[in-house]
Each structure stands twice: as structure tokens, then as C-alpha cells.
Image (tube, rainbow, N blue to C red):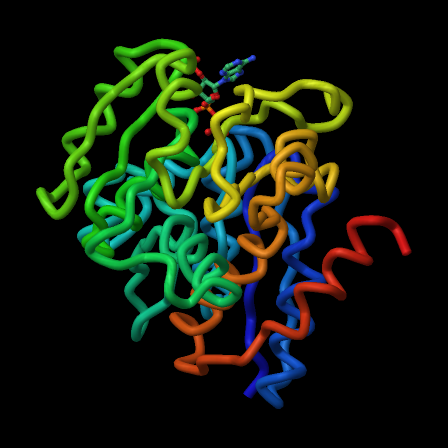
Amino acid sequence: MSLKLGLIGHPIGHSLSPWIHAKFIDLAGLNGEYKLYEGDHEKLPSVIQHLKNASIDGFNITVPYKQVIVDYLDELDKDAEILGAVNTVVNENGKWKGYSTDGEGYVRSLVEPYPDLLHPGTSVLLLGAGGAARGIYRAIVQKGVKTVDIANRSLDKAEALLPLNDGSSSSRVMSFLEAEQHLHEYDLIIQTTSVGMKPNIEEQIIRLDNLLESTVVSDIVYQPITTRLLKDAKDRGAKIHHGHSMLLYQGQLAFEKWTGKNLEVSHLVDELEQKLRGE
Ligand code: ATR
């Protein structure tokens, strides 16, 4: 049997998912393909019809279709329904079911290098409140940590994340200035906005003067691999977590849903870094 997988989105020409899933198909000892289906909004219904006719086993879906794809699904996983976004579709006996692997993939990428980080005493600060923050916020809260506070430029957008909390953690909304003043209270700080992304590599979302060395600073931006925020954190003696590993573990979770195979992928983190550096 040859596995049929792919990615729908626009633009996706530079996506690393084909590289990642080709590695996974190899590691799993399977045959198959992971194709890119790029198209603007008018093309989406015909792309979907093509994938139905081809009996695709599963696919990822990215910007700008993470919400509209719901109209084409037979079933929706509970978390995807609550988040209002799908990034992975699984063909389950002819029925298409939508999942969101962003948040859980992020958590997997984090606990791989820091297995003891998330526990009932952990305090987390989330920077940003956009689409990426939503999935990460819900997944971290579901780990039953003590606190997940949210700092964002516009406070109303941060408030909009609070209904995603199932009550497992306490959450406060604050400005970046307030976050800077309280930085020493957190075990983990997660940067989820595009601030610091190429070409704006000199940008840094908050000052780290009050950072403790024991804190882990994580940035989901992976171009550059080491953002200015991560470099600053490292220079202050704190621990860091790079964004590119999230790509790998989101893929790992999607691949698990498509094939039932839970692959060991940690050795690919460095390979992916080299690929991103163009080596
Ligand atoms: P994504 O889906 O990639 O998360 P998004 O939904 O547009 O993108 O969310 C972008 C996030 O980055 C938001 O939290 C946004 O802050 P606002 O809610 O105040 O708009 C944040 N963001 C983007 N550019 C920013 C900047 N220059 N400074 C601070 N925050 C910024």
C-alpha cells in the first residue's frame, strides 16, 4: 500500500512539510508521497474534490484554509471544534475527520528537551494572542500547570483566549510592560507572535531584565533559528527552546493520526535546523 498525503494552503511553496514527511515515511518503513496542493480560494473546492476522488489518506491544511476546511469535513475532533481551526485531516474509513495538532505538537517539542518542565506548580507566560497562541494556550492549560498568563499588545484579544481554558490553570491578562515587571515569576515564557521574524531580526517583543536563569524561553519563530529574544535569554544564562522543533512534532502527531505509528523523531531536530540554515 502506498500512503497518499499532502498539504493544502496558499502560499506553501517554501513549506518544509514534504521534507519532514518524506523522512517520516522512510522511518516508518512505508511507501508513499506527500504532495503540495497550492491554490487560491476559487480553487479550493476542486482541490478538495480531487483529494476525495484520489482517496487521500490524510492531509495538512494551513493558512488561509484552517477555518473554511470545516465545511468539507464529516467529523471534527473536540479540540479542533473548540479552537475553531483544523490543521490535520484524517481519512477514517472514507470519512474525513479534522484535528488540530498545533498545540499538542508544540508541547511535545517542549517536553522532549525539558521533560520535567510542565507540572502542577509551573507558571507560564504566553506572549501574543493570535491563531498560533490559541492552540498553544489550550494545550498548555490541558497539562494542568498552575498558571498561564497572557500578555498581548491588545488586551481584548488576549481576553478572547480565556474561554479556551477548561479551568485547569489560572490565567491573567496583562500588557507587555506588566509582563516585563513580573518576568521573574515564570518558569516558562512562550513567544507566539511574528515579532523578530526575518527580515525584522532586530525586533524583540519584551525586555528580559527581570529574567531568571532557571526560566525556559521559547520562541515559535524559526527564521532565524535563534531570534534576538532567544539570544538575549541565552546571554542572560537562561534556557531556550527553538521554534523549528515545533514543526517536527506537529508533523509527528499528524503522521501518528494518519498511520498509527508513533515515530522517534528527536534526531531530526538538528537535521531540520541545518536544512533551515540552507546547509
Ligand atoms: P498568527 O495566526 O500567526 O498567530 P495572528 O492571528 O495575526 O497571527 O496574531 C498575531 C499576534 O501577533 C497577535 O497577538 C498580535 O498582537 P495584537 O493582538 O495586538 O494584534 C501580535 N503581533 C503582531 N505584530 C506585533 C507587533 N509588532 N508587536 C506586538 N505584537 C504583535
Residue 275 lies, with reference to residue 203, above or below; the image says: below
Residue 75 visible (yes or no): no
Q: Residue at x 69, y 37 (%)?
A: 231
Residue 157 visible (yes or no): yes
Residue extending farthest right: 279
Residue 211 position, x and y percent, is 49, 33
The quadrant of the picture occupied by the N terminus is: bottom right
Residue 67 position, x and y percent, is 35, 35
Residue 28 position, x and y percent, is 58, 85
On the picture, is 256 further left or further right than 263? left
Residue 198 position, x and y percent, is 74, 27
Res 2 → quadrant: bottom right
Residue 248 lies, with reference to residue 9, above or below; the image says: below
On the picture, is 192 further left or further right than 154? right
Q: Nearer the viewer, residue 119 or 67?
A: 119
Q: Residue at x 43, y 59 (%)?
A: 52
Residue 167 lies, with reference to residue 274, above or below; the image says: above
Q: Residue at x 42, y 27 (%)?
A: 127
